[in-house]
Image (tube, helix red, strand yellow):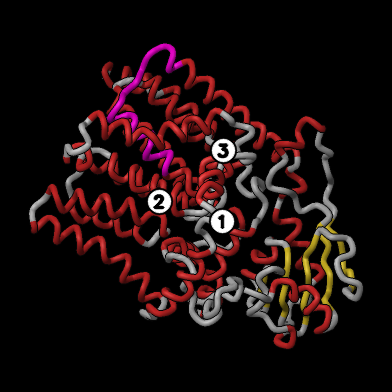
Amino acid sequence: MNSWRFTYRKHIPFILFLLFYALLGLYNLTTLPVAWTDEVMNLDPAIQFHKFGHFFSKLWPNPGAEKVFASYPPLIEIWHIFWLKIANPTVFNIRLPFLIFHLITLTVLYFILIKSFKNNYISLLLVLLFAFDKSVFELSRSVRVEVIILLLISLYYLFQTNSNSPYLKGLLSGLLLIAHLYTLPIVLAWLIKTYYKNNLRYNLKYGIALIIPTIFGLGLINFEVSEIISQLGLQATKHTPQSNGFCNILRDSFWGRFFPYYIEQPFVWLIYLGILFMPIYLLIKHRINNKSALLNGSLLELLLLGITIFGAMSAQYRYLPAFLLIGIITFASEIKLNNKIFNVLLTIVVLNGFLSFTARHLTAIYQRQERLSEPILAFLDKNIPQYKKTLILGESIGEYYSATHKLCDYGLDYHPIHFKFTDYENVYFLSKDSTPYLNCKKIGQYNPLQNHIPSFMTKFAKGGTYSNTILWKVESDSEFKKITQPYLIY
């Protein structure tokens, strides 16, 4: 009993952190950020399946998506379809599981690090480094697939030492396989190591479990592989380096990916560069040709993922959390650096992240009345006829309105190619622009009680608010074309 109490007490700082993180996350769940583009694009195919029993999305611009959706790997859609069978599509309900997934990831990471370092303090610092990283805490609230990816990766490494079940490891690998294209190198590394280190019987069980999620995902689109090739192929081309010239690509990937995005956390850039070059150091340390260095731990997947993200993917911050997670796990297992200078430097980086994290949350609390979703949905409900075929274009909150109204569709005004004005009795446009189009009729303006942000807080006022959102009625086909015309070429 005394031993249990001692162990429990060692973990109190982490438990207090997790409680702080959870309570803030829960309080600001619907307000940081307000409904935004990627969130509703990922949600839309599941909304359509929930409403009509057919897996498609007019919201995505790729040709064919309006018939069967194959523009994105299916894991997040499978989750949304499952969750919508249980919960109503409100902002709170949709985001709550992602907060829980993220809290589980932080907990799993902590215990992975404890096992490597045997040191609660340094393990906690590395968890804080991860949790307060700008890309991690923003994406953890974004309803993007990265939250699920991080959970799957952390669970795989936890079970790597705690379980040797081929079915469990194969299932985690299979789920990651259908999460995103940039996760393929991770799965490839896991596959190579599994098949090299185990016997045929184990590998067959692993392979069966790995392929099940893919089969399920293909079944969702009636095994129309040609649609995956055309839609997902087109989507992938939009996320490859866009710069001309090798030097420009290097600049964008190693600098533009971080700045000005990471200007609040400039030291983190050095952390990422350190992780990027860590595999090279470790390969030299292990004399490069030593197979055991690549077949144990997480070095191979970190190497392949780093090459993919920094060499073949567009300069987006959204790919960084998985790289940071595996980098921290690799660092803990391979280097185990733990001295006073390192701890001081790590503490400085963590404090910087903490200030950025808490400032964002405090701003959301300060602007809470402007960011709550329920009042603006009530505003739309009051001003839009309930029993007419309706299309809403513009601000992303319109998707959550349409999700609970079967006669209502939602479209992004810059992805309008699958919508026709003549298919609807009413077309509305949600905009922050006070005079967007001359012949649109202004129906109303959403003006909640506002707290004017002090000037020093403006840099942290990310995520926007719903304040001053205007509902316009588009009264003619010509006005609909004015809204959509600049975006019709893809």
Q: Secondary structure at mark 1?
A: loop
x then y, percent, for residue 217: 37, 70
The local crowd at label 1, few if under 14, some if 14 to 19, many if 20 or more residues have their Cα within 10 Å, is: few
Was residue 430 drawn as part of the magenta stretch in this picture? no
Residue pictured at 75% horizontal, 42% vertical: 367
State which tag comes first along the sequence, 3 or 2.
Answer: 3
Q: 147 left or right of 358?
A: left
Q: Secondary structure at mark 3?
A: helix
Mark 2 — residue? 308
The local crowd at label 2, few if under 14, some if 14 to 19, many if 20 or more residues have their Cα within 10 Å, is: some
State which tag comes first along the sequence, 1 or 2.
Answer: 1
Q: Can you tell which of label 1 and label 3 is closer to the viewer? A: 1
Q: Is residue 291 above or below residue 199?
A: above
Q: Secondary structure at mark 2?
A: helix
Mark 3 — residue? 134
Residue pictured at 42% horizontal, 74% vertical: 228
- Mark 3 and mark 2 in contact? Answer it, CB < 8 Å: no
Q: Can you tell which of label 3 and label 2 is closer to the viewer? A: 2
Distance of label 3 from label 2 (alpha carbons): 21 Å
Q: Hey, which quadrant is residue 431 in on the image?
A: bottom right
Q: Is residue 106 above or below residue 485?
A: above
Residue pictured at 21% horizontal, 39% vertical: 296
Q: Which residues are magenta?
A: 323-343
- Mark 1 and mark 3 in contact? Answer it, CB < 8 Å: no
> Which of 89 and 307 lies nearest the eye of the viewer?
307
Mark 1 — residue? 244
> Which of 431 and 364 lies nearest the eye of the viewer?
431
Distance of label 1 from label 2 (alpha carbons): 18 Å
x then y, percent, for residue 454: 82, 32
